[in-house]
Image (cartoon, rainbow, N blue to C red):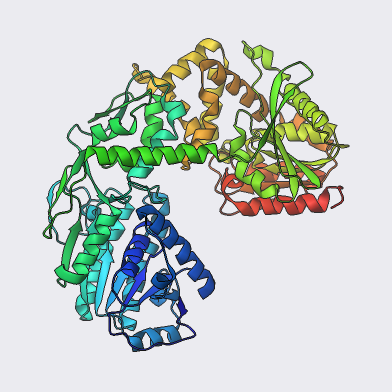
């Protein structure tokens, strides 16, 4: 590759191109095909700190693309690429004036705008508009600045919004109606391209692929988890919950609803054909397949081999908790299950896909999900027995000179702290364990039993693994165990870290409760009353509700597994819902851990003499961040050690690597262990 910011080059006899979005799923396949064709050089806009970093990013992306279609990437292919550092969210894509001058002097015929945000939710509205509408405006300004002759905008066939029936290759009204912000932004951007290019005499074409899947040649997913793959992921990562449904899971949809899927290599073939043969300025092109797939049968294919199924219904009444849960998790996909669009296409049709093709796509993606799951743990599992002869598994990672013990939230699998543990294990030996839910049959059995059982387990693990000195790090309800251990075992635990300790209910007013906490305050005591009530709520979760008065209760119970949009996290936090007995024990444990009195909490914190770091997040929808700030006032060692994250959430430890760095630094500074 050539750094165009330091070297100009002569005008090519072949037509030169410029593109954005080269590292995306569709863009990288287009770039690979372009490089393998007898075309001219291509400028590639890429977000990076430097040309070198941009080059490396593009190469990695092209390697993925080549592997997906069974091709080899060679040095000769890369000679055509000219790296341009920039970002579509910046004016003229952030391209510096010198670079613009070089590109303009050498001449660009085609400008390909692939970059886009595929997000759709209301909460991401600003990001969607910034990337898809403002980003397109910036790309148009860049095309004008470099005097490109033609502008190709990669849109979507679903700019048609909620229209059904025949969909023409023409601009749709910006008034919609639309299913989501993604559709809205792409439709608005189409009009922006049309108006701008007409005003500035730039030839243009609007290319509209439907739902893009992996290459037809290999049926690989191409490291993509959007569209069809997002739906498959939503189903299979929820399987541990869905499998408990007592009847087919009802979803909004119609028996004749269908979806149009198009292989990425077919989309690229169409784009190249339009470039070379079919181009007509101002025209809209549907890059869609000749086959539509029925949604009900699609669900059947996705769940083939599973012990649960889906049933599409116009308007499911009295949904169970699991049906509410799935509707929330898959809201984006269920917007299309009543879809009956027929995309009109003027250019030659693509080869049709078959149901056998679809089965291959699903199988390859599902196999990849489970392979990823198998290889997704770096913990060494150490089987142990407690002093009472109970089997407990400890999980160990890293071999650093210091030790960090992680106290997980009760009832959660160790995988939920896995990314956090990986970050810490670079410098420490990291240890966690299964926080078992003690089994009792009545609510009265629980008084002070759970905390003491977990503290004994912690002591036994420290003894078995020869932990003489450590930093104790806790998350969510694990904070209660951490506070007790810090207060009673100061000789072992030299420092403490409390991550999102906001769930403690002591002294909280209704103004400092999140909607989730309000729900748990209502439903937990009911579940914890007896095994019979636990069985009732378990049935509400997994069976269609027969009584209207049960609808609110079904909604409350489904809230427990709707705390995050991350499908892997969602699967992990659903662990305590394996049976009525598990729900009963979980409810009683949470009540004990979250309802500690303010007086007892102050007394407990008064016994803590070690330095303590508290981390809380303003975007935590599970518990209000102000509760963590109040807790910090009770712990003398927390003074000056409170971190309030403006952007984090309840699961920051899972997806924010910077949090592990903060904890690492705190541990190094405050634990007496020599480094």
Q: Is residue 530 above or below residue 209?
A: above
Quarter assignment of residue 117: bottom left
Q: Work out whether 107 lies above or below 281.
A: below
The residue that appears at 64% across and 39% down in the rendered structure is: 502
**What is the total number of numbered labels drawn onto the structure image?**
0
Q: Position of residue 36 (x, y in %)?
A: 33, 67
Q: Position of residue 388 (x, y in %)?
A: 77, 16
Can you give x and y, in whole percent of width and height, for residue 94 in the image?
44, 76
Q: Quick check: 146 above or below 650?
A: below
Q: Where residue 541 appears, x then y in whole percent? A: 43, 23
Query: Where, by quadrant of the figure, is residue 246 drawn?
Result: top left
Residue 54 relative to residue 301: left or right: right
Inspect this view and state whether residue 156 appears.
no
Q: Nearer the viewer, residue 600 or 285?
A: 285
User: Residue at horizontal 56%, vertical 19%?
Assistant: 582
158 horizontally vs 305: left or right: left
């Amino acid at each position: 590759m050539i750094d165009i910011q330091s070297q100009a080059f002569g005008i090519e006899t072949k037509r030169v191109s410029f593109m954005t979005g080269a590292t995306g799923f569709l863009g990288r396949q287009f770039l690979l095909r372009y490089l393998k064709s007898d075309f001219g050089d291509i400028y590639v806009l890429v977000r990076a700190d430097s040309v070198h970093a941009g080059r490396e990013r593009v190469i990695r992306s092209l390697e993925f693309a080549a592997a997906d279609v069974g091709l080899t990437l060679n040095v000769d292919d890369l000679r055509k690429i000219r790296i341009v550092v920039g970002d579509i969210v910046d004016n003229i894509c952030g391209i510096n004036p010198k670079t613009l001058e070089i590109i303009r002097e050498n001449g660009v015929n085609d400008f390909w705008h692939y970059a886009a945000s595929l997000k759709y939710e209301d909460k991401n509205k600003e990001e969607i508009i910034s990337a898809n509408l403002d980003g397109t405006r910036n790309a148009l300004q860049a095309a004008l600045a470099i005097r490109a002759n033609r502008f190709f905008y990669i849109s979507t066939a679903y700019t048609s919004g909620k229209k059904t029936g025949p969909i023409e290759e023409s601009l749709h009204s910006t008034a919609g109606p639309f299913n989501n912000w993604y559709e809205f932004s792409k439709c608005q951007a189409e009009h922006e391209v049309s108006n701008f290019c007409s005003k500035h005499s730039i030839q243009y074409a609007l290319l509209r692929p439907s739902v893009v899947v992996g290459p037809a040649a290999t049926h690989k997913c191409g490291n993509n988890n959007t569209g069809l793959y997002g739906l498959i992921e939503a189903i299979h990562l929820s399987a541990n919950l869905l499998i408990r449904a007592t009847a087919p899971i009802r979803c909004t949809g119609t028996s004749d609803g269908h979806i149009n899927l198009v292989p990425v290599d077919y989309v690229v073939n169409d784009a190249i054909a339009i470039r070379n043969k079919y181009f007509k300025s101002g025209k809209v092109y549907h890059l869609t397949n000749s086959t539509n797939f029925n949604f009900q049968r699609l669900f059947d294919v996705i769940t083939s081999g599973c012990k649960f199924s889906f049933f599409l219904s116009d308007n499911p009444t009295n949904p169970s908790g699991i049906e509410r849960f799935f509707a929330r998790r898959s809201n984006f996909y269920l917007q299309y299950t009543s879809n009956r669009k027929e995309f009109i296409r003027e250019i030659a049709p693509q080869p049709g896909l078959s149901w056998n093709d679809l089965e291959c796509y699903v199988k390859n993606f599902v196999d990849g999900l489970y392979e990823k799951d198998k290889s997704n743990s770096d913990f060494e599992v150490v089987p142990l027995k407690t002093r009472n002869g109970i089997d407990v598994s400890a999980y160990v990672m890293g071999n650093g000179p210091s030790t960090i013990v992680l106290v997980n939230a009760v009832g959660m699998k160790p995988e939920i702290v896995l990314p956090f543990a990986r970050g810490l294990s670079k410098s420490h030996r990291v240890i966690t364990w299964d926080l078992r839910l003690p089994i009792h049959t009545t609510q009265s059995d629980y008084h002070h039993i759970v905390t003491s059982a977990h503290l004994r387990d912690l002591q036994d693990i420290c003894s078995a693994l020869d932990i003489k000195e450590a930093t104790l790090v806790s998350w969510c309800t694990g904070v209660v165990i951490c506070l007790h251990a810090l207060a009673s075992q100061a000789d072992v635990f030299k420092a403490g870290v409390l991550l999102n300790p906001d769930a403690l209910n002591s002294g909280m007013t209704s103004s400092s409760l999140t909607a989730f906490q309000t729900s748990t305050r209502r439903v937990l005591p009911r579940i914890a009353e007896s095994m019979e009530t636990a069985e009732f709520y378990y049935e509400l979760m997994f069976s269609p509700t027969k009584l209207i008065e049960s609808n609110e209760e079904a909604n409350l119970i489904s809230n427990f597994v709707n705390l995050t949009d991350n499908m892997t996290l969602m699967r992990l936090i659903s662990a305590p819902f394996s049976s009525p007995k598990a729900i009963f024990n979980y409810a009683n444990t949470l009540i004990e851990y979250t309802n500690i009195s303010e007086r007892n909490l102050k007394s407990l914190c008064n016994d803590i003499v070690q330095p303590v770091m508290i981390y809380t997040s303003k975007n935590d929808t599970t518990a209000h961040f102000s509760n963590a700030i109040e807790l910090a006032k009770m712990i003398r060692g927390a003074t000056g050690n409170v971190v309030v994250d403006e952007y984090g959430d309840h699961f920051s430890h899972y997806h924010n690597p910077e949090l592990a760095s903060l904890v690492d630094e705190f541990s190094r500074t405050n634990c007496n262990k020599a480094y």
